Image (cartoon, grey):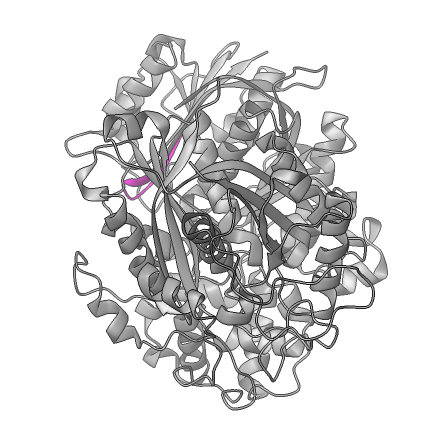
Amino acid sequence: MLTGTIYINGISCISAQPTLEQGIQVLLEKNDSEHFKCIEPDYKIHFSPIALRRLSRILKFSILTAQKSLQDAGLDMPEAIITGTGLGCLEDSEKFLLSVIENQEENLSPTAFIFSTHNTISGQIAMTLKCNRTNNTFSNRYFSFESALLESILMLKDGDAKNILVGSTDEMIPMIREVTQNMGLWINPNTGTTITGEGACFAVISETMTEHSYAAILAFKLVFKLSTGETIQDLVLSFLQEAQSNIEDIDVLISGESEEEPQAYTPVYQILPHSSIITYKHLTGEYFTASSFAYFLGANILKYGSVPAHYLKIDRMAPTRPRKILIYNQNKGKYHSLALLASV
Amino acid sequence: MSIRVYITGMGIISALGDGITETLANLQNSSSGIDKITLLSTKHAENLPGGEVKLSNEALLEKLERLKGGKTHSRTALLAMVAAQEAAHMAQWHHTKARSAVVSATSVGGMDQGEIFYQDFLKDKPSARLALAKTHDCGNHTEQIAELLQIEAYIATTSTACSSALNALIHGVRLIKHGGFERVIVGGTDAYSRFTINGFNALMILSDTPSQPFDKNRKGLNLGEGAGYLVLESEDLIARYPKKPLAEVKGYGNACDAYHQTASSPEGEGAYMSMKQALDKSLLSTEAIDYINTHGTGTVNNDLSESIAMQRLFQGKVPPFSSTKSATGHTLAASGGIEAIFSILAIQEHLLLPNLNFQEKMEEVNISPQTVLLKNQKVDHVLSNSFGFGGNNSSVIFARC
């Protein structure tokens, strides 16, 4: 459990919604791809012909999202770049593995291997910015983004940085979509259809508020597994208590509910009867770093003071002027993450 | 007032030995674990020597006492659990009540099983075993360590190529200093895979003979596999369960070359900055460092860049240094954990560890590594470097306590 005041001073997100260029207000009802595929911009405007050829999708959309969040924060150079990714650079990993098998381990080009490692993303962002400072990558299932955020906050507290570029990214490729579907992962259990998504979200965080600040993170807690007998209601209530907040203070709950486990969050909805409830995975999909979208939503709602109707759960009222937001995510009873966001 | 963080347990498995005792004996005999590859099925088994752990997956599995059966494990996870079990045992893990976490590191996770799955998947989809694919991601092995050591509060995995384990250690230190944890097991693991061997081979940085770090005629690195884990504890926890710590984590740094995806900058900017940060954090002077366990892969590029960075930081008075990768091979994400353990063994046993196979000094610099084992040395502070792909550079300083 971390408490204090950490400001989100810039944030950008690419997702299956037009968030990169239009924020959270515009809804795209139907995404025609087989999964929740990112709505990508025309990369030609942003990258040189060499980079366009060489960089995979995940690298292009991550670099772009990271750059946009820095511009949003009015910051040229962060003192750390920390990325979380659940599955890393899948396109290049598959490309290299295929070449190893097809060419029977002979006469291989190293290019795909070079761009296959998980830290390629943070590394390429550093190279684009020419940033020599701390560079780190976390890859741990549903904590991939959350661990990156935790390490960023710990670094700020450790006095090792003032402004940190922290983010998440994951790409989906057809082969992994097929394999996860066969595993029964990231599907609607009733229909068997995939709910797999992809995307990237980068933010600039700092202990210093600026004119660009969106919101403050007041408390943050990660719990891998609940202790014996502990329920998610206990978890949320003790979190709020440690954060010195009451259930009445929570204007909005941003829930990680997905079609994969539609009832998983109901106990939390029950203890927050007066809060508005927001869900997003029905519009952006499920993936290891899907929960970073909640931070993008939360930051924007607090900055602009309103909740777009398409994210609201229908049986709850829209808040008038949201000041405090609780973010809660979990996956099948594990990887619980909680954050308390406040307006600034 | 900053909380002090100590090491109370260590566990290791590499080509140089299974466990601390065997590894230390082999270090003291200046042995090398570099040999022909015999367990991994690869075309390069004959021509590319490396540091393979000569235990089958079945033999590794048998070593795990508390493991519940019936699961599929990657070799990466098996190596990790064997080393983590030893570290936990030394730190009396199961007899200490503490708020605990695990932070583990890997570069390719369960690729050793993932690549088998993928090959089967290409040939005949239904025959490919999904259980193998489930071990593929980096987080899989960390969940297995957590289960073995009954860790529920928090788990994390770093993946920054060859610097991964030191970044896991740094996250662990910060969890204790600022995150409310009392004890964190940290380290790294990587198993041989055809993916990795062929990747490094395609980059043309593998040597077909035992590697010669810092030598004028060095030809490249030997890959290795293994795992190294350390138990970190807060000073308060040690007060509650009194024991003599093995060493203290004194300083740490992480910087980025931001130069090239796979090569270090000629002036070693990232290496210089990560060592400098670690020194600044430790509040030690450069003179206080008694030994540097270098990254020292044996590639033309790394060893020159790292030497230049050491010369620059230590201003002509570079302390004794060596690369123990000449004995273990480059164990990638595990190397930071394995070499942290070597650094602590050097402190505990008053040793300067040898850099094997060194013959001739590089022309571009004025320094050469420690080539023979020296006993009864003053070794109170050791700097350990791990540098990686993507320009990731990390350094940690360990101190006698």
Above or below A265: residue B69: below
To which quarter of the image does residue A156 belong? top right
Q: Position of residue B387 (x, y in %)?
A: 62, 55
Magenta extent: A327-335
To which quarter of the image does residue A297 belong? top right
Q: Residue at x 40, y 14 (%)?
A: A250
Q: Quadrant of the C terminus of chain A?
A: top right
Q: Position of residue B228 (x, y in %)?
A: 40, 56
Q: Is A334 positioned to the left or the right of B341 in the image?
A: left
Above or below B355: residue B274: above
User: In terms of secondary structure, what is the magenta stretch mainly?
Assistant: strand
Q: Residue at x 35, y 64 (%)?
A: B79
Q: Nearer the viewer, residue B9 or B243?
A: B243
Q: Quadrant of the N terminus of chain A?
A: top left
Q: Position of residue B116 (x, y in %)?
A: 41, 77
To which quarter of the image does residue B129 belong? bottom left
Q: Nearer the viewer, residue A140 or A184?
A: A140
Residue B231 counted in the magenta span? no
Q: Is B43 positioned to the left or the right of B147 in the image?
A: right
Q: Residue at x 56, y 13 (%)?
A: A343
Q: Could you tell me how many numbered marks the image carries?
A: 0
Residue A330 counted in the magenta span? yes
Q: Is A302 positioned to the left or the right of B87 in the image?
A: right
Above or below A126: residue A316: above
Is residue B135 at least partly visible in the picture?
A: no
Is residue B228 at least partly visible in the picture?
A: yes
Q: Position of residue A111 (x, y in %)?
A: 69, 71
Q: Is A248 positioned to the left or the right of A322 in the image?
A: left
